[in-house]
Amino acid sequence: MSESRGFSYAIVLAAAFLLWIPVALFGAGGYSALLALAAIPAIFFVRYRSFGWLSAAILALVVWAAISTLWSAESDAIVSGDLAEGNFGVNAAGLRIVLTALASLLVIGAGLRIRGPNRIALGVILLVITLHGISMLLMGIFPDTALGLYAPFSDPVREAPQNILRSTNAFSLAVPVLIGAAWMLPSPWRFLASGSAFLLGVMTFLLVRSDVALLGSILVLLAIGTVFLFRQNGLRILLGVVGAAIIAAPVILPAAAPVAVRNELPLPSSTKSRIFAWSLAAKKVHERPFVGHGIEASKEWRETFADEPELLALMRQSTDLTDIPWEKYRILPGHPHNMGLQLWAETGLVGVILACTVLLLLALALPPPSSLGMPVTIAAAGLIGAGFSLFSLSYSLWNEAFWATVVLVAAAIVLLYRQKPQA
C-alpha cells in the first residue's frame, strides 16, 4: 500500500477526523487512541529512510523521560485491566509518551508523503472542525441544556463541565486550520472567512468561559502577526520564543506570585492557584537541577501552604476569603500546570537541552516560506500560539491526549500544505 498505488493517506486523515467531534465531546481524552488508529495505516506509507536528526531528537527526549521513571517517586504498573473486558490501559507515563511520539512520527511522516491536492479530504476536515466549533458555541449559549445532555454519561456538576472545557481547548488548537484554509480564498473573501473563523473561536471561548483558550486566541493573533511581519523567519522566531520560555521558566515563573499579589492583578482563581504552584515547582528544580525528580514526580509533591509560610501569606493577601484554612491546602495539585517548568522539575537540564534541540532542529527543517505559502504559515503559527497557551497554563507535560491533538491538527496542516502540487 502506498501513495503511488492510488490510495492516499489523506483518506485516512479524513476518516480519523470523522471521529474528532465524538472524541472531543467526551473530554478529548480519546485523541491518543485516535492518533494510534491513524498511525496503524501510516506504517505502510512512511518512507523510513527519511527519518533524520529531528526524529532522533524527539525519540531521545521521550526515551530520557521514560528512563527518569527509575528515580521518580511516582511509578505505576506498566499496564492494567483486561483487553477483552475493555478496560485495558497503559499506566506507565514513560511508555505512554514513547508510544505517542512513535505514533506522531508515523502520522506526520505519512502525511508528508501525500502527493498533490486532495480537496475532498481537506473539506471533510474543515467541515468537522467547523461543526465542532458550532457545537461548542451552542453549549456556551445553552449551558443547562448541554449539561442535561451529558447527565446520562457523566456527572453534570464535576465531570461534564470539565469535558466541555477540554473539548473547547481541543477546538482552540484546530481554529488556526480554519483561519489558514480561509486564506486560500481570493480577496476580500479570505478576510471575511478567516475573521469569521477567529470570531467563532473567540465567542465560543467567552461563552464557555475558557480563559486559557481565550488567551490562546490572543496568542494566535500575535503569532500570525509575527509571520506577516517577518515573512522569512516568522515561524523560527515563534519556535525560539517557546524555547526561551522553557529555558527561563525556573527564573521567571517563581516571581509571578509576589508580583501578581502586590500589584493586585485581577486574575481568575484558577490562575492564582497556578502561580503559587509555580513557586513550589521552581524550588524542586533547584533540588535536582541536572536530571530532575523523574517523570510525574510532581504528583507526589504534597506540600501544603503551612509548609511554605511566605506563600501562605501571599495567598491570604490575594483573597478576601478569610474563612478558608489555606494552610491545609496543597500548593501543587497534581502537576505544575506549566510544561516548561515541569520539564525542568522532572527531567532536569538534560531534558531541557533535548527539548530545545528538538525545537532548533524543527526550525531548521522548516521549508522556505515561498514553498509553504501563507495559508500554511498562518495555520502553523496559529497552532504554535494556541498550543503555547495550553502548554503554559493547562495540562501536564505527559498528557498524551494533548500531544495527540496537536499532532492531528499538525497533520491537517500538512494536508493543507499538499493542496499545492508538489514537484
Image (cartoon, grey):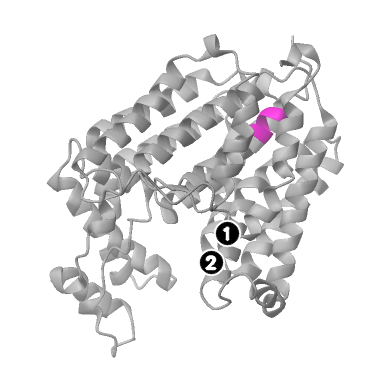
Give 112 or 200, whichever is nearer the viewer. Answer: 112
Instruction: List the residue tagged with mark 2.
Output: 162
Main secondary structure of the magenta stretch: helix
The answer to whether residue 405 is seen in the rendering is: no
Q: Position of residue 132 (x, y in %)?
A: 72, 55
Q: Earlier in the sequence, mark 2 or mark 1?
A: 1
In magenta segment, residue 160: no
The answer to whether residue 217 is seen in the rendering is: yes
Amino acid at pointer 2: Gln
Q: Eyeballing the image, is 54 above or below 400?
A: above
Amino acid at pointer 1: Gly
Residue at 54% across, 78% down: 157
Task: Magenta stretch: give its range.
Answer: 411-416
Q: Secondary structure at mark 1?
A: loop
Q: Count all numbered tags in the image, as a single digit.
A: 2
Quarter occupied by residue 369: top right
Quarter occupied by residue 36: top right
Q: Residue furthest bottom?
A: 323
